[in-house]
Structure formats: C-alpha cells, structure tokens
Amino acid sequence: MKPFSPYIAQHCTGSILVILFLLSTPVLADAFQTALVTAALERTQHSVRYDGSYHSIPYPGGDVPPNTGVCTDLVIRSYRALDLDLQQLVHEDIAKHFSEYPSHRIWGLTRPDPNIDHRRVPILQTFFSRHGIALPVTQNAADYQAGDLVTWRLPGNLPHIGIVSNQLDQGSRTPLIVHNIGAGPVVEDILFHYQITGHYRYWPDR
C-alpha cells in the first residue's frame, strides 16, 4: 500500500510524512474492511458442505475442495479473494514462533503443518492477536465494526469464527455475521448467541 505519491515522499519532511501516514491509515483500513465484507458476503452464494477433515493441500495458495469447508475456510477464502493468503502468512509466522502458538498444547504437534494450521480457530486467534489488533470483547453491538473477526465457544466446547458484516438485524440492530456453522456460508444474527472468545481486526501493512 502506498498512501502518498512519490513527489510527496521526495519533498516532504519526515514529520509531515508521519502525519500524512497516520491520517491515511484509517482510510486504507476502512477500504480493506469494506472489501473483506464484500468478499465474505460473496461466499454466501456458494454451496459448501461442512467438512473439516484433514487434506494434504498445495502450499502456498492451497485449499480444500471448493464445495467443502468449515468456518475457518470461509475466512481464508474471503481474505484470499483480496490476495491475502492466510495459509502462507500463518505458516511463515508459526514456523518462526512455534512456541507462541497452541499447536503442541492442544493437538500435541511438534512442528508446523501448512495443510491444517490456518484452518484451526485457535491458530487464527493467535495469528490475529500477533499481527492484527486484539479488541475488547463487549456486549455492545456498536463495538463490532464491519470486517472485524469474532470467535466464539459453541456448545460442546467447539471454537468458531466469523466476519462481521455491514448489515444490521432489523429488530436488534446487531451486526449480522457471515459464517459457516454447519449449513454452509450464511449471514445471520448470531453475534451474541454464543460466548465470544475473541474480537480482532486484521488488514495488511498495518
């Protein structure tokens, strides 16, 4: 991302450049968040059978069969539509900082696995905490902006993740969530239906 022209970069002082960058960053972030929501909503047009089974996939840019997937695959595919490959980004980070991730604690792994790491909610939570913004978990709907990522704990102690949309429930005025909880990608009012375990904001070059 290049928020200012080469002329400005050549002729402005360092302090002015810093000010310009700080002013432009929210605009760039908002544009990315809007594009992410558009990509996520587009996923609801696809028929996807819920299937979290392990697959050996190419790296980078690998994906499970397009007619299958789980909640994390919706997030991965939405970011990939914006040329952001979470498979590669997660693998590069976990390969360098394996002990920072819960791979060993939860699954007993001793090394990264680019086939599955990015498809696991706790791994994505760690990645977004490390490279994005970890935001407060609240019960205030206004705190959840379009393009934010939310994680939940479902009944049965199952982790879940979705993307906050730019649509509101007509009754509660709560942001609708784009997610796949079992019936394929949908957009619906589930933000406060389950225990929220994380709230994140992630865009490139932040």
Image (cartoon, rainbow, N blue to C red):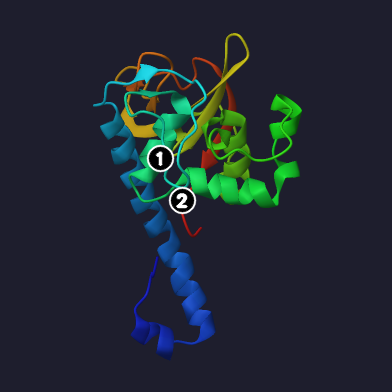
Q: Residue at x 65, y 40 (%)?
A: 112
**Foreground residue among 181 and 103:** 103
Tell us which disc is closer to us: 1 or 2: 2
Residue 162 visible in the snapshot: no
Q: Is residue 99 above or below residue 139?
A: below
What residue is shown at x 62% (from left), y 50% (from top)?
Answer: 93
Please state the horizontal and vertical placement of residue 178, each as a whole percent of the image: 37, 27
Q: Amino acid at mark 2?
A: Trp
Q: Secondary structure at mark 2?
A: loop
Please give the label number shown on residue 147.
1
Report the amino acid beneath label 1: Gly
> 32 above or below 138?
below
Q: Residue furthest top?
A: 156
Q: Position of residue 190 (x, y in %)?
A: 43, 18
| Residue 63 position (above or below residue 20) | above
Circle nearer the N terminus (1, 2) = 1
Say which of 88 and 100 sits in front. 88
Q: Which residue is mark 2?
A: 203
Q: Are marks 1 and 2 in contact (CB under 8 Å)?
A: yes
| Residue at the image position 30 percent from the left and 31 percent from the top | 43
From the top left corner, tell me how far across and down residue 63 is, in percent.
41, 36
- Number of marks in picture: 2
Q: Secondary structure at mark 1?
A: loop
Task: Tell me: 36 left or right of 128.
Answer: left
